[in-house]
Amino acid sequence: MRLPAWGLALRLLRSDWRSGELYLLSAALVLTVAAITAVGFFTDRIERAMQRHGGELIAADLAIDSSRPIPDAFTDEAAARGLTVARTLTFRSVVLAGDDSQLVQVKAVDDAYPLRGEMRLKADLDAAEEPAGTPPPPLAAWVEPRLLYVLGADVGAGIDLGEARFTAEKLIAYEPDRGGNFFQIAPRVMIRLDDVPATGLVTDASRVRHRLLLAGPREAIADYAEWAEPLLPAAAGLIDAREARPEFAAAVDRASRFLHLAALTTLLVAGAAIALASRRLVDRQTDAVAVMRCLGAPRHLLTRIFAIRLLTFGLLASLVGCLVGWLGQRGLAALLAQWFEGPLPAASIQPVLVGIGTGLVALAGFALPPLLQLADVPPLKVIRRDLGPPRVSVAFAGLGAAGALALMILWQAGDFELAWKLLLGVVAAVAALVALGALMVWLAGLAAARTRGIWRLGLAGLARRPAAAILQITGFGLGILALLLLAVVRVDLLSSWQQTLPEGAPNRFLINIQPHETDGLADWLAARNIDGAGIFPMIRGRLTGIGERDIEPDDYADPRAQRLAAREFNLSYALDMQPDNTVAAGRWWTGDDPEPQFSVEEGIAETLGIGLGDRLRFQVAGEDVTAPVTNLRQVQWDSFNVNFFVIGTPGLLGDQPATYITSFYLPESREALVPELLRAFPSVTLIDVGALLEQVRGIIEQGIRAVEYVFLFTLAAGLLVMYAGIQASLAVRRAEHGVLRTLGANRRQLLRGLLVEFTAAGLLAGLTASIFAEATGYVLARQLFDLPFALNPWLWLFGVLGSGVAIGLAGTLGTYRALVRPPLAALRAGG
């Protein structure tokens, strides 16, 4: 029986395609798969590119950092996996230039450094930057400009480091992984790794940091990290770009969430189009199935034939969708090529498999339930044209669609929080659309009995087909919701995201400011019209206790928690909370002299298991400082303002030894002030984060353009679902209009009735979609992206009135061809 079933299924599939029965369904499915694969291809490539940008923060894709020499087994394993490796060594020492000395941070690098990013140097302060193709020559040193200011030396001067004498050959303009060591207060001196033995400074007892840098394909890096993590010595840890700087991590995380949101929105709306197109296909297939039943085809054979047709059609349409998605991502990559340094990494085959799987799941969930009902068409349908298609089980169709929807969202989201909130929002929106649609149909039936003329004709059109009308209104609502979400995300959320890093964001940090220098520095900045963000105290302290328990790194399984427990924190104190901080739990302290208490950033609190009311114990300058946690804060890290993980009250930390930190924006045209600043305050360390700032700003711009492009698929899906909603009732309308024309109704009356019906449906669908678009925008902004949100009155104007006008006109014009057919032809066709 298998061969006849397959053969008949393929012949019927070919016949359906030639007759145009599958055009709408194939368009919906191709669009669904194209959106998923385009996003899959591109997000795969863009995340690799972002990882490459992030790799600049650690000069690699992954790093092993240790206070002890890293065993050769880790290098050997990396080589066996085809990864590129480099080694660095950092330690503090003192350099001498004549009678002057200065504490420095020495960094020794091998020939492969850096694996990601590029060193840039200057021959002198006034020279242009130039890339460094190789590490320093033997017994040559590259130094930060401020070291020469402090020593009163020039480029080319000799400096003594341990037992070796080096030449200060060039100035360091940019060091890729300097951002990951933000609070190093000593000037940098970079030498060759081969020259370290000549200094005599590194012995088994020396305090040094060893780092093994690794670079390679993302999958290989992930596999290596998984292999290495359980084997790391106690003094070693893994570092990746996301942990290097929270500002960078926040930008990448938001970009990824926006892209997944765009893909999921397209998927949801295209799913509605598949459901509507499937319903239309069922209506068109009933006659053919009735004939097959008359010829003796059993129910199980028809079910098998429909399943084979659906599977074959799904595979073919999914493959076409994958091709369209691949072309789409190439267009996106070409559009954004100028925003990336070098070509984007190649895409993998995985998005194709995901696209085909998504297509089949979507087709099975949205289209299979109504199509399987065709097997129940009675043979009598050949004679009794009024029997119509079989009644679809609402529970069966609903469970199939809901199951497919949940599976696709959880599969595609890449973020469980985003997935379940979006799923909950969609279920609520669909339920509201169905409920309001049913209410409208009921009210339309009441109103039709009390009105006359075209109003009665239009409103009665809704009441005559309640199930079809509710399905149509729901489809319209989902289409409009997609278009409004496009506006919300495109205009409101993306603009808010871009404003988190406005022009003029701080690009210079000053650290190691001594207490007696704060007033002078503030006056110096004010005299030159440089607006600072304030000068904040910074106190070094190590967390030693939470509540009644002592804290040790081994208490945590999470490597990041282990590193946090092992290192010193940068604490601060303040009476007022900074503007880019918000209280997530608890209350900020008030009054001029509040009781001793701590405020903790919510992310680090979650990592270390800190809750409200817990008493924290820090060791500061050899003393224990304890206080309860009274609030948890959300910190906008990508604002590039000075921020701290832990803040205390002035009465708690005000008497502790502290240095100070500030940030400010310095335009490129005023770079000449840097030497003046360093000469006026030689002990202050200036950190230039301009390059890192541009990286984060570039990620935001790239992410915005990527989301805008991906939402073009959502726009197409929204238009398609509205078209499918119009076409879903076209066959029935032909028969109705044939009867009405026979009874004396003219085309103008029928056309006005259609306008009333579709405009009413559009107004209700637009009202519901506007409500849920605003609600969804609020949830996305506040709970997923940590962005401000404001109500948009234009959304309601275009959402309600615009959808009423648009759907009224589109529905009327879309069904106009049903009016131009002679009544006899419509009656003979039976719809």
Image (cartoon, grey):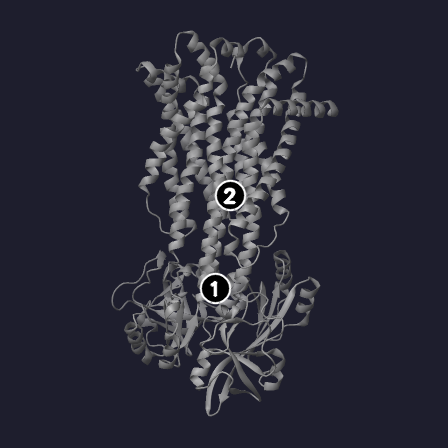
The answer to whether 456 is drawn above or below residue 606 in the figure is above
Q: Residue furthest front?
A: 127
Q: Give residue 664's quadrant in the image.
A: bottom left
Residue 208 percent coordinates (x, y)? 56, 78
Residue 179 percent coordinates (x, y)? 48, 68
> Please, what is the three-letter code of the amino acid marked with disc 1?
Arg
Residue 662 percent coordinates (x, y)? 36, 70
The quarter of the picture where the N terminus appears is top right
Crowdedness near tag 2: few (<14), some (14–19) or many (≥20) residues, C-alpha within 10 Å: many
Helix, strand or loop under label 2: helix
Q: Residue at x 53, y 60 (%)?
A: 53
Q: Which residue is drawn at 59% across and 74% down?
A: 88
The answer to whether 696 is drawn above or below residue 93 in the figure is above
Residue 129 relative to residue 520: left or right: right
Closer-to-camera residue (192/448): 192
Give the residue pinned by disc 2: 263
Q: Residue 245 bears which disc, if any?
A: 1
